[in-house]
Amino acid sequence: MSDQISEKPVAGEGADRLIVKGAELVTVASLVVMTAIVGWQVFGRFVLNDTPKWSEQLAGILMVYLTLIGAAVAVRNDGLIALDAFLAKFPVKLQIACRLIVELLILAFAVLMIVYGARMAVLVEAWTVPTLGFSRSVNYWGFPIAGAMMLLFTLRRIASRRFLTAHLHRDNQS
């Protein structure tokens, strides 16, 4: 059955890869910087007996971006937790229907992230992070950014029909 389902080529695959590479770079850089900040915080607390006040806030912001953008990349790579073992027990048509439902739920979630993340960012725009001196909205802009990436990646997967064949190929190989 999986041989009968063909994936459609979708224009812009190079741009898609470029976005993913940029997102991966942001997540890796966030992890490295966050690790250095937390290390400095621990050093300051236990060795210098003077904890840097900005370190916890900045590490928290980096963690938000690391998590959200990493989740968007996981959506692109179809790396989110799935029910493959459970779905494998169903007939192929039901597997495809379930995968489509999952894709639609991801789209809905992405739209919610965009809309409510942007609303929250705008709502707290006037507030500042005291230890860093910039707007608290920085904490929330990661939601619409990651939501837009998830929306793009999921729409492209649906358009290319990759969601139809991704798990069927795995089942046939095992």
Image: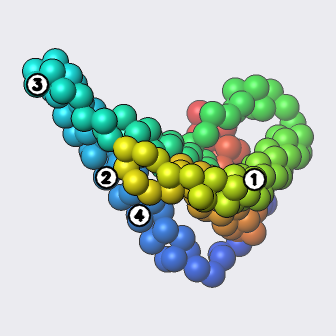
Name the quadrant containing residue 174.
top right
* Type of amino acid at the residue the image marks with label 3: Leu
> Circle 1 is placed at which residue position?
116
Q: Are marks 1 and 3 in contact (CB under 8 Å)?
A: no
> Circle 2 is placed at which residue position?
29
Query: Viewed as shown, does residue 119 lie left or right of 46?
Result: right
* Type of amino acid at the residue the image marks with label 1: Tyr
Circle 2 Cα neighbour tier, 10 Å, few/some/many (<14 / 14–19 / ≥20): some
- Give whichever of 82, 72 is nearer the camera: 72
Of badges 3 and 2, nearer the viewer stands: 3
Disc on the earlier residue, 1 or 4: 4
Residue found at the very far top of the displayed protein: 46
Circle 3 Cα neighbour tier, 10 Å, few/some/many (<14 / 14–19 / ≥20): few
How far apart are the alpha carbons under marks 4 and 3?
39 Å
Indicate which disc residue 26 carries. none
> Circle 3 is placed at which residue position?
48
Of badges 1 and 3, nearer the viewer stands: 3
The residue depicted at 89 percent of the width and 40 percent of the height is 94
* Type of amino acid at the residue the image marks with label 4: Lys
Can residue 24 be spotted in the picture? no
